Image: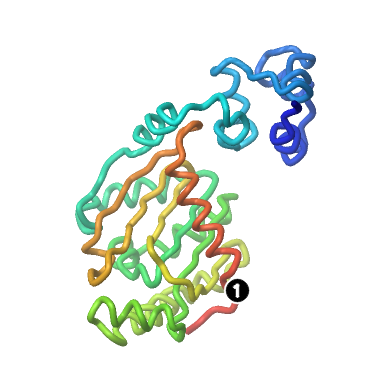
Amino acid sequence: MSNDRLRSALASASMTSSELGERIQVDAKTVDRWIASGRVPHRSNRQRVASLLAQDEGYLWPDAVSDSQASAASRAEVMTVYPNRGSIPTSLWHSLFENAVESIDVLAFAASFLHDTMPDVDDLLIAKARSGVRVRLAFGDPQSEAVRIRGVEEGIAESLAERCRLTWKYLDPILAESEVAVRAHSTTLYCSMFRFDDDLLANHHLLGAPANHSPVLHLRRLVSGRLFDHHLKSFERVWSSASEAPFS
């Protein structure tokens, strides 16, 4: 049976079997056999192919990656668990923002703490975007039902919507920058996310508690892991439904 997932991943990456073989140092005919006959490569080759094609190894070869292997890789993705957001060192926030070279993604309702923690965060984001880093920021629509409900659940009523409005005011310098993508979302937010290349801080929301009182996972992407990519897919779903119209 042919491996149509591998074939499709190659096409999406605009890469031929010869080019893939050259990149991972195997014969092109070997790559063709992986596709045409569904032959499963050795683990080292599977990992290199998955990395090059930005795909999950378990997706390309679901029969080859056991649940135990995937579980072990996912556990290895967890760098640190913080009991609450306030316990994240300020130096880590600075390091993650400053060292990002490919992507910075932020998903939250307000995340006004960023401007308190890093007064120069707007300038830093603009500089990163101008240097070629893809910057995507998604914050809550203060008029949305999702923000209203979260405010009630946290026991702060309209205060959350006011924080969202404050964040949009903070963003004024960024909104004028075409290099930075900013959207407003109105989704139920179960997890605030802060992604910097292959590092992601996932601030999960617990009912009745503000986000800053809830635990944060520091994840680092691994080829065979599933936690990082699972969170990123959630970000993409919110991003695709968010509005490009800013709120002030």
Side of 45 relative to 197 (left or right) = right
Residue 97 spot, x, y in % from top left: 41, 51
Can you identify the residue that label 1 sits on?
A: 244
* Category of crowding for the residue at label 1, using alpha-carbon neighbours closer than 10 angstroms: few (below 14), some (14–19), many (at least 20): few
The answer to whether 124 is drawn above or below residue 67 in the figure is below
The answer to whether 220 is drawn above or below residue 48 in the figure is below
Residue 55 spot, x, y in % from top left: 60, 37
Side of 100 relative to 37 (left or right) = left
Side of 16 relative to 207 (left or right) = right
**What type is the residue that disc 1 sits on?**
Glu
Q: Nearer the viewer, residue 108 or 204?
A: 204
Residue 203 spot, x, y in % from top left: 33, 57
Side of 170 relative to 239 (left or right) = left
Q: What residue do we see at 37% from left, 29% from top?
A: 72
Residue 158 spot, x, y in % from top left: 31, 87
Q: Quadrant of residue 74?
A: top left
Point out the image quarter for the N terminus: top right
Q: What residue do we see at 60% from left, 50% from top?
A: 132
Q: Quadrant of residue 58?
A: top right
Q: How is the image coloured?
A: rainbow
What secondary structure is marked by label 1?
A: loop
Q: What residue do we see at 60% from left, 19% from top?
A: 45
Q: Nearer the viewer, residue 164 or 180?
A: 164
